Image (cartoon, helix red, strand yellow):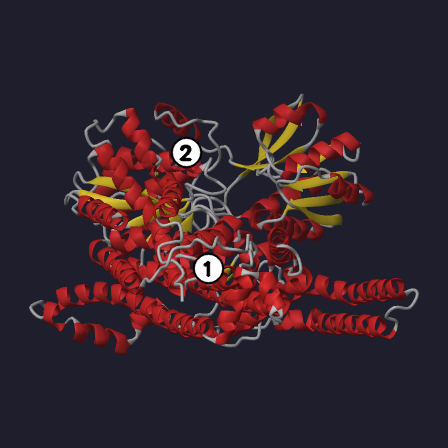
């Protein structure tokens, strides 16, 4: 009986969704709604959907077509489940393009097994692994978040410019922390800096005394922390302060957050670091429309990147004059890169009209999108320093 | 924990099994017709792998009552085999530190034989334990002294894209066998230490050891690239993008669809053919995987059935149902337990290697107990522990639900709230949380099965 019910349920769910109206274009949003980043993805998905809604409401897309979003859960860690979800979006829902996936590992599986073989464009707003730069995607994969390799280089230069010649490094043992630590070490040593110890830590431990003791024994005066501010990274800093091992910390984007400054800011005066983001032309415009749509402005990273990924898909559709998968992919760099009239968040209707008139546009968006040949964005980073217990922005790199 | 209550009812499920598998096939065909065949095949492939994993656990739990909660570790070992067998070797890394790794391996082997020798020579004499400890500590120091510079050198070789030794560059199918042997080796070692323990202690030991195995894979970058992941594993089947270019494949698709392509002019014909070729390539590749996986499953299932029906199978069940009695009859309880622990783990290892092959990547960071230990346990329990076909059915059904819970959950929410307006807050909230239905539905299935069919969907057959 139960199986009969299930069968009926599946049958009904399919007949319900199978008939989409002709003026509807389906786009997939494939993100890790369950799993390690489930607290970030609802805001990211809402941001992407905000862009699609803006486009649909404008009535300017391909003569008044509407975009329907189909969400699917990529689970962040389970490549098999992510592949199945992507397969459903691509072959059953017949989406014309994907926003996603969200984590680096599953994104690789989805691009290799589903989106590239089926010729479907996917733009990830949050997969930052350097390995995705060289993936064999036949040009069907882009990302609006910069690769971790870039941040390591920027941070190494900042540290060296401040006259610091010797550091200890601790990183969280996953692809983010490890990738960052390697790109930082390489650039820093090239600049003449010395790394006395480069040790990993695992997230989710109750006590980091052993790790900090090893780092303290190295004798370096500054500690570089590549971790998460609500995980092991914070534990390390807390313990280093308690034992008096370190007073100044060098931090990457996973550690730079208001919560961290509020908790420990008073004790780490002069610590500094980098976070993704810059003096973006579109930042104010993005904040305004995000507030208007009730997307929490402190709701975590990658919201602007998600909006941009979605907006680019819609603009490319208009530029291609069709919602054909390959045609959209062919136009994505045209609308994203200079030259052309600059388009900011909230101006998508204007962008669509300009394209329809045959003019060239340069989508700037919330995060200054500009794709290189590998489909990566260069990304800019903000140098942050703790002053009077708060993060203060110093300079854009 | 390892003993079944004696009041278990009599079961004969030939009819039930045929019906259940017919329903399964029906569900997959339904997905194929209403969603897409590519999706149905994707789910089927993962069902086959899940079924194999569940079969491995069933060998341990269903035949012998061994409570192994370290399945994740064996699946990961199988995954690691795909790297070691199939990735091309990194020549620079071998030059930089390969010799040191080999010598360190020799040093470890020498240490082990020295310790064994001391153990045998001095058994029962004074300083026996002390001397063995000295030998082992010395061995560890020496092998680390040889290994460490080699590891540093290997990991320094182009760390962004390699930084590990690579593999042997053999066809990936061999990795399935090697994965089985790796898992079997680990199981032998664990079994030697832990199988003497009572069942609940065995559970804790396997849980801990599986975490250790995965931690090693996450940290030994020279071997597995650690958390930097190995992607782009070679496939045993053609690549879609190559098939889409291959003339023989395009011709084949053209001929198969000649009926529907007939009345079109040449530009339309080319466009329709192009779409058909892309779709067919994806389905063709999946069918190849299905064939390979089904072959492995059928072979191992047949071996399991034969084993369980043999005198050996009767002995094992006798041990499970009453260890003391079996021992009194002169059966080697510990020996059989070790044997079964190794066999079951090897099957899980093979399935783990197949899964990594299908994903095309090995990502040590993604092995979590929820997905790789407890979900497999749910498969065995829902399917019916002690019954080979039951484990296979459980693997199929649970994986299907795991994947389809999301669209079904969305449809349920949509149907439940269809009376409300589109901007209704409750409707919006419910539709947005459809993704989380997966866990709820899985729990509900487990509860329902336990309530209405406490021995699983296909209970063990009494004979």
Using the rendered image of the protein, determine whether residue B157 is visible from the camera's viewpoint.
no
Residue at 18% across, 47% down: A15
Q: In front of the other: label 1 or label 2? A: 2
Using the rendered image of the protein, determine whether residue A245 is visible from the camera's viewpoint.
yes
Quarter of the image where the C terminus of chain A is located: top right
| Residue A126, percent from left and from top | 46, 44
Extreme-top residue of the structure: A388
Vertical placement of residue A65 versus B343, above or below = above
Extreme-left residue of the structure: B263
Q: Could you say which disc has been placed on residue B296 in the image?
A: none
Extreme-right residue of the structure: B126
Give the quadrant of residue B395: bottom left
| Residue B309, percent from left and from top | 44, 73
Residue at 69% across, 23% down: A266
B173 vs A392, left or right, is left
Tell which of A158 and B124 is nearer to you.
B124
Q: CA distance from mark 1 to mark 2?
A: 27 Å
B296 vs B279, left or right, is right
Residue bearing the label numbered 2: A43
| Residue A373, percent from left and from top | 43, 55
Residue bearing the label numbered 1: A135
Vertical placement of residue A228 versus B349, above or below = above
Vertical placement of residue B160 versus B437, above or below = below
Mark 1 chain = A
Give the quadrant of residue B409: top left
């Amino acid at each position: 009986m139960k199986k009969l019910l299930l069968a009926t349920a599946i049958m009904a769910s399919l007949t319900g969704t199978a008939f989409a109206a002709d003026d509807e274009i389906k786009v997939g949003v494939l993100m890790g709604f369950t799993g390690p980043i489930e607290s970030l993805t609802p805001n990211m998905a809402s941001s992407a959907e905000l862009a699609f809604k803006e486009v649909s409401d404008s009535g300017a897309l391909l003569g008044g077509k509407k975009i329907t979003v189909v969400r699917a859960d990529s689970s962040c860690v389970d490549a098999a489940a992510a592949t199945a979800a992507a397969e459903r979006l691509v072959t059953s829902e017949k989406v014309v393009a994907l926003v996603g996936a969200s984590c680096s590992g599953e994104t690789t599986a989805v691009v290799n097994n589903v989106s590239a073989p089926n010729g479907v464009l996917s733009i990830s707003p949050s997969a930052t692994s350097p390995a995705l730069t060289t993936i064999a995607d036949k040009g069907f994969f882009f990302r609006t978040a910069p690769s971790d390799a870039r941040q390591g280089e920027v941070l190494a230069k900042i540290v060296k410019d401040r006259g610091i010649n010797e550091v200890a490094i601790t990183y969280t043992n996953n692809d983010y922390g490890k990738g960052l630590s390697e790109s930082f070490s390489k650039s820093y040593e090239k600049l003449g800096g010395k790394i006395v110890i480069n040790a990993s830590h695992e997230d989710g431990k109750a006590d980091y005394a052993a790790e900090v003791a090893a780092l303290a024994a190295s004798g370096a005066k500054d500690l570089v922390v590549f971790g998460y501010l609500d995980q092991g990274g914070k534990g390390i800093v807390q313990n280093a302060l308690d034992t008096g091992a370190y007073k100044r910390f060098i931090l990457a984007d996973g550690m730079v957050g208001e919560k961290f400054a509020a908790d420990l800011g008073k004790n780490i005066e002069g610590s500094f670091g980098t976070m993704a983001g810059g003096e973006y032309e579109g930042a104010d415009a993005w904040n305004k429309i995000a507030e208007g749509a009730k997307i929490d402005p402190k709701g975590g990273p990658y919201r602007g990147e998600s909006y941009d990924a979605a907006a680019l898909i819609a603009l490319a559709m208009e530029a291609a004059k069709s919602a054909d998968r390959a045609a959209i992919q062919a136009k994505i760099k045209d609308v994203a890169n200079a030259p052309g009239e600059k388009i900011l968040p909230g101006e998508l209707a204007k962008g669509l009209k300009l394209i329809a008139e045959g003019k060239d546009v340069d989508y700037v968006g919330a995060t200054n999108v500009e794709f290189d040949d590998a489909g990566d964005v260069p990304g800019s980073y903000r140098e942050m320093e703790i002053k009077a217990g708060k993060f203060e922005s110093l300079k854009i790199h | 924990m390892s003993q079944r209550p004696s009041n278990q009812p009599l079961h004969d499920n030939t009819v039930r099994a045929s019906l259940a598998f017919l329903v399964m096939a029906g569900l997959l065909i339904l997905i194929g017709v209403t969603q897409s065949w590519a999706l149905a095949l994707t789910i089927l492939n993962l069902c086959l792998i899940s079924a194999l994993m569940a079969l491995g656990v069933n060998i341990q739990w269903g035949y012998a009552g061994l409570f192994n909660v370290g399945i994740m570790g064996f699946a990961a070992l199988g995954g690691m085999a795909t790297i070691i067998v199939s990735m091309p070797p990194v020549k620079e890394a071998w030059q930089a530190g390969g010799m040191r790794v080999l010598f360190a391996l020799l040093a470890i082997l020498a240490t082990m034989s020295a310790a064994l020798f001391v153990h045998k020579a001095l058994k029962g004499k004074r300083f026996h334990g002390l001397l063995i400890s000295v030998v082992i500590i010395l061995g560890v120091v020496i092998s680390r002294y040889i290994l460490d510079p080699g590891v540093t050198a290997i990991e320094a070789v182009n760390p962004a894209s390699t930084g590990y030794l690579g593999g042997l560059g053999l066809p990936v199918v061999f990795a399935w066998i090697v994965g089985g042997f790796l898992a079997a080796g680990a199981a032998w070692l664990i079994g030697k230490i832990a199988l003497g323990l009572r069942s609940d202690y065995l559970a804790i030991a396997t849980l801990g050891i599986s975490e250790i195995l995965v931690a090693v894979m996450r940290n030994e970058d020279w071997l597995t690239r650690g958390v930097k992941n190995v992607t782009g594993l070679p496939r045993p089947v053609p690549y879609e993008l190559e098939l889409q270019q291959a003339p023989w494949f395009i011709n084949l698709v053209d001929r198969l669809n000649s009926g529907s392509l007939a009345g079109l002019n040449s530009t339309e014909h080319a466009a329709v053919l192009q779409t058909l070729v892309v779709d067919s390539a994806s389905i063709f590749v999946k069918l190849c995987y299905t064939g390979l996986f089904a072959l492995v499953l059928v072979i191992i299932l047949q071996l399991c059935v034969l084993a369980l029906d043999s005198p050996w199978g009767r002995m094992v069940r006798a041990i499970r149902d009453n260890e003391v009695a079996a021992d009194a009859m002169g059966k080697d309880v510990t020996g059989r337990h070790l044997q079964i622990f190794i066999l079951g783990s090897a099957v899980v290892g093979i399935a783990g290697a197949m899964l990594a092959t299908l994903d095309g990547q090995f990502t040590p960071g993604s092995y979590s107990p929820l997905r790789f230990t407890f979900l497999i346990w749910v498969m065995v329990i829902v399917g019916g522990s002690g019954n080979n076909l039951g484990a296979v059915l459980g693997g199929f059904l649970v994986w299907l639900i795991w994947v389809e819970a999301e669209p079904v959950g969305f449809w349920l929410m949509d149907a439940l709230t269809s009376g409300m307006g589109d901007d209704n807050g409750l409707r919006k909230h419910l539709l947005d949380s459809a993704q989380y239905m997966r866990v709820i539905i899985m729990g509900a299935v487990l509860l329902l099965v336990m309530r209405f069919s406490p021995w699983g969907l296909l209970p063990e057959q009494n004979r």
